[in-house]
Amino acid sequence: MIPTLKGHWLLGSVPEMKRDFLGMLVRAAREHGDLVRFRIGASDAVLVNHPDLVERVMVSRMANYGRDRAFYRAARSILGTALLINEGDSWKRRRLTFTPMFHRKVVERSAGTMVAATQRLIERWRVRPGTVDMSQEMSALALGIVGETLFGSDFEQDAPGIAAAEDQAAHDVFAKVQMPFQIPGFVPTPANLRLRRSRRAFELPLKKSLARARRSPDEPTLAAMLLSARDQETGAPLEERHILDELIGFLLAGHETVANTLTWGLALLAQHPAVAQRLRAEHTAVVGDRDATHEDVARLTETSKALNETMRMWPPGWFLPRRALQADELNGQRIPAGQVVWVVPYVLHRHPAFWSDPDRFDPERFANEKEKGRPRHAFIPFGAGQRMCIGAAYAWLELHMVMVTLLRRFDFALAEGAAMIPNPYVTLRPRGGMPITVSARPTA
Ligand code: HEM
């Protein structure tokens, strides 16, 4: 029998989920092992927390584990049929449509834009150094980069509206998931009405990108590609609302995740000056005085280790819920059809069998020889299997370009009130932001 975490007699784990979801999951895995059941009102979910089991759910038996209905039904009010939550043949066709645009060789062309956008931020900080909310700064930076490189748009004016809609939507989607009983999206509850408003707020800037793509269909933007895409069977173009679904999906998946990693990364480096020093020495040796390019990434190994360790501790995609379509067996335990299973990188990345002293920041865990001893699916910041992050190569490039450009020119220190407390919504952001004091380096 799969052990069940003790909870409230009627609501099960719901009160604890609301209070401290991450803490609850970590504790449950520590106390009960690699499979733990949670009661959530009338339903339940099983945490799957071992690399071999993750491999089965996400790779070898991937077809048997669909998107979890509760989570994705809640997200549908915002994302519609976007790749992120789409399933079956429709997902497969769209994934094939987008794949060429995210090939490493194609995304490498964006490196210059990534560095230039970071330099514009640096100029701003140079004029007004001091304490900033790094979470907001990185979010605006990543939004600007995704806007320029994928949407052919400057989202600067729209950034506050997008950020506000994001906060509200993340809150509402997660609140819906945590309800013991689900209310369908068409019922005009206050939360559902707010979700519709958030959707309209995302649509506004994206409709501009779409209008531009209609005028200039040859520009290499997602909108232009979606406008020219044809259904393989019917030959029909995509409906506008489906194009908007995809654009919203890429807008959201493509910047918050990167912004989270950069924010946590800078906060960790501020706390570990010796590591920051190693990264700067590496930058001097590999890049020197010129701007970083995509060709540097493979040689920026210290930076890669620090970024990996950041995503181990604070994986932006921290929660990957699935639902078994047919009965299966995990670790000799029966998983009935319809069972919701949770793969939680945040907990997996702290599994004591693979990560000693898991709450300690130690990029050396990602040194080559240590990597070799670990099962492949002990570390899954970009997911695993066919549904792995389509933007992984883009994100990896952006993380390196931004991080080395910032570290070269600025010092970072945690400011008063900074706390490494994660807010487990759709992505894993720092709760209450991340106040960091930025000061130009003497040599800059
Ligand atoms: C550090 C940055 C990023 C992290 C940690 C990350 C993480 C992830 C993870 C864990 C998944 C799998 C979700 C699941 O299996 O349920 C995923 C999927 C996805 N990501 Fe990312 N991501 C990042 C950046 C990006 C970027 C830059 C883009 C686009 C520009 C992007 C677009 C997507 C899309 C569209 C999917 C859905 C793929 C599918 O289901 O076929 N991501 N991401």
Image (tube, rainbow, N blue to C red):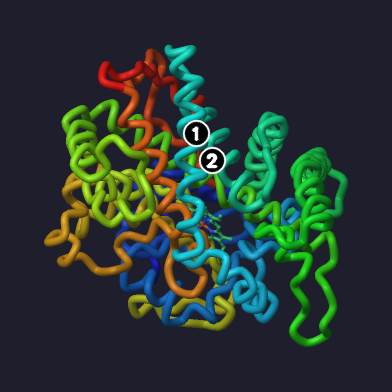
Residue beneath disc 1: 138
Q: What residue do we see at 44% from left, 73% from top?
A: 385
Q: Amino acid at mark 1?
A: Met
Q: With 45 as the anchor, is 303 left or right in this view? A: left
Q: Position of residue 223 (x, y in %)?
A: 73, 58
Residue 202: give its label.
none
Circle 2/circle 1 CB separation < 8 Å = yes
Is residue 17 shown to the viewer in this render?
Answer: no
Residues 34 and 94: in front is: 94
Cα distance between the residues tagged 2 and 1: 6 Å
Image side of residue 135 versus residue 308, left or right: right
- Name the foreground residue: 127 vs 343: 127
Residue 18 percent coordinates (x, y): 55, 39
Image: 161 above or below 7: above
Element type at mark 2: helix
- Which residue is depicted at the point 51% across and 63% down? 106
What residue type is disc 2 on? Ala
Q: Residue 396 at x, y = what percent?
A: 40, 53
Classed neighbour count for the residue bearing mark 1: other residues with Cα under 10 Å, few (<14), some (14–19), many (≥20)? many
How many callouts does the rendering have?
2
Q: Residue at x 45, y 64 (%)?
A: 104
Of the 4 image quadrants, the one containing the C terminus is top left
Front in this rendered view, residue 311 or 295: 295
Location of residue 335 in the rendering, given as x and y in whole percent from the top left corner: 48, 76
- The residue at label 2 has a CB less than 8 Å from ligand 1: no
Kind of element beneath mark 1: helix
- The residue wearing badge 2 is 142
**Direction front: furthest residue:** 290
- Residue drawn at point x = 28 percent, y = 69 percent: 376
Give the residue furthest to the left: 369
Pick whichever, 99 or 14, lies toward us. Answer: 99
